Every structure is written in C-alpha cells, then in structure tokens.
Image (cartoon, rainbow, N blue to C red):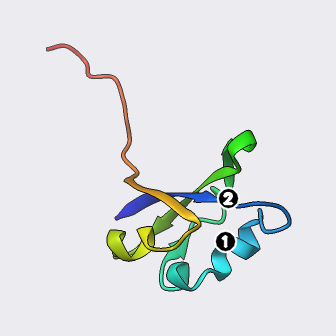
Amino acid sequence: MRSLITLELHAPDDSLEYASSLPVLKDLQIDTAYGLVPISPKRHLFVLRVEGDLDRDKLLCVPQVKGVHGDVNVSAIEPD
C-alpha cells in the first residue's frame, strides 16, 4: 500500500537523505522518484511517498512526522 507521510524538517535536515535516515522510515520503501515534496515552505512541511506495511501510530510518535495518509488515485467518473 502506498502512503504519504508529512514531515516537518528544518534546514539543514530538509533533504531526502535525512528523511530516509529516520529510524521509523528505514523499513519502508521510499519512492525516490517522487522525492521530498515541499508543501508549505514557511511551516517547513514536506511529503514523502512510501510503500510498505506501516504502523501509523508508531510513525506519529516521531516528532518530525506530522501526518500519515493513504495515497489514492483520484480521477473523474464517467457518467453512465
């Protein structure tokens, strides 16, 4: 299952290398092609896409983790 993880990272730790070194993320497959996407530079928020069996509660205990969400494809529905 793919998930998005929101992280709060401050310079100089606002890199994919740093994020992927967090112990709680080591067992997850990080989508490096997706990268570390800034979603709110003023608030130092970034998103990572990961795959794997994750423990949401364990992730949210890490100070840098601000959210865990499913990554779903959204598309228009064609009328019948």
**Badge 1: how crowded within 10 Å, few (<14), some, or many (20+)?**
many
Quarter of the image with the C terminus in it? top left
Looking at the rendered structure, the secondary structure element under dot 1 is: helix
Q: Indicate the amino acid at tag 2.
A: Gly
* Quarter where residue 64 is shown: bottom right
Locate residue 77 relative to residue 65 in the image: left or right. left
Above-or-below relation of 76 to 59? above
Give the camera-side residue of 13 and 30: 13
Quarter of the image with the N terminus in it? bottom left
Task: Please give the name of the residue rendered at 70% of the width and 61% of the height, measured from the top-left corner.
Answer: 9
Farthest top residue?
79
Q: Nearer the viewer, mark 2 or mark 1?
A: 1
Locate residue 65 relative to residue 74 in the image: left or right. right
Q: Indicate the amino acid at tag 1.
A: Ala
- Disc on the earlier residue, 2 or 1: 1
Task: Please give the name of the residue rendered at 76% of the width and 60% of the height, measured from the top-left corner.
Answer: 10
Locate residue 37 relative to residue 1 in the image: left or right. right
Whole-percent x, y for residue 6 in the image? 54, 55
Give the camera-side residue of 45 and 75: 45
Above-or-below relation of 12 to 77? below
Task: Please give the name of the residue rendered at 85% of the width and 66% of the height, measured from the top-left corner.
Answer: 12
What is the distance, in whole Å, between disc 2 and disc 1 at their CAs? 10 Å
Q: Which residue, given by chain and number where applicable, does mark 2 sit on?
A: 35
Task: Please give the name of the residue rendered at 36% of the width and 46% of the height, measured from the top-left corner.
Answer: 72
Residue 54 in sight here: no
Q: Which residue, given by chain and number where applicable, does mark 1 sit on?
A: 19
Whole-percent x, y for residue 5 in the image? 50, 59
Whole-percent x, y for residue 17 in the image? 75, 74
Is disc 2 in contact with disc 1, using a CB cutoff of under 8 Å? no
Looking at the rendered structure, the secondary structure element under dot 2 is: loop
